[in-house]
Image (cartoon, rainbow, N blue to C red):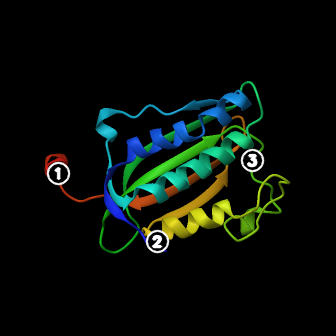
Amino acid sequence: LKLNKEVLNLGELISSAIQDIKNQIEDRSVQVWYEPKREDIIFLEADRHRVVQVVTNLLSNAVKFTKGHGGTVSISTEKKKGNDDDNREVALVRVKDNGSGIDCDIFPRLFEKFATKSFQGTGLGLFICKGIVNAHHGKIWAENNADAEGKGATFYFTLPIVKGSLTAITKK
């Protein structure tokens, strides 16, 4: 997978993905919440098109499986320490919905080719997302929500953030 990397603002990429599926959001009467805070500005060295593709796919799936009025999808980001030996920081992106959750039959193969129970999808979206995230040296995973409502699912992915100060990055 060829990547055209550049320094990007993660919040702007997420906002772009939301705009890309605005009609789908309105058609389904689902509320999408994303309110980036100033202190949450995160810069990545990544392929703009590919990262937007990942966020758009996760959002589109969340909206599709969150049925009608009262359905909500929230997106949040934060900086975290990575799990690897070089102690790098990563951006953690969370896409959470209160939809039907992930079917237990499909869960073990969720990120494999053709993993779907939907008649509308090909089962390739999450497989492609995994390839894109892996190409950026990140991780992607999902879980069913275990909160008070016990409904829906949360998809997570991490991407390495650009090292250095905000000032140094914006002067590039």
**Residue occupying image coordinates x 59% and y 61%:** 141
> Residue 135 bears which disc, if any?
2
Q: Nearer the viewer, residue 147 or 75?
A: 75
Q: Amino acid at mark 2?
A: Ala
Mark 3 vs mark 1, CA separation in Å:
39 Å
Q: Secondary structure at mark 2?
A: helix
- Quarter of the image where the C terminus is located: bottom left
Q: Taking the image as drawn, is residue 145 in sight?
A: no
Mark 2 vs mark 3, CA separation in Å:
27 Å
Question: In this rendering, which labeled residue sits more in front, label 1 or label 2?
Answer: 2
Q: Amino acid at mark 1?
A: Ser
**Residue occupying image coordinates x 54% and y 54%:** 53
> Residue 101 bears which disc, if any?
3
Relative image position of residue 166 (x, y in whole percent): 19, 47
- Quarter of the image for residue 164 reads bottom left
Q: Secondary structure at mark 1?
A: loop
Crowding around mark 2 (Cα neighbors within 10 Å: few <14, some 14 to 19, many 20+) is: some
> Residue 165 bears which disc, if any?
1
Q: Secondary structure at mark 3?
A: loop
Q: How many marks?
A: 3
Relative image position of residue 99 (x, y in whole percent): 74, 39
Question: In this rendering, which labeled residue sits more in front, label 2 or label 3?
Answer: 2
Mark 1 vs mark 2, CA separation in Å:
25 Å
Question: In this rendering, which labeled residue sits more in front, label 3 or label 1?
Answer: 1
**Residue occupying image coordinates x 46% and y 71%:** 135
Relative image position of residue 123 (x, y in whole percent): 74, 62
Which numbered disc flags the more N-terminal residue, 1 or 2?
Answer: 2
**Residue occupying image coordinates x 57% and y 66%:** 130
Which numbered disc flags the more N-terminal residue, 3 or 1?
Answer: 3
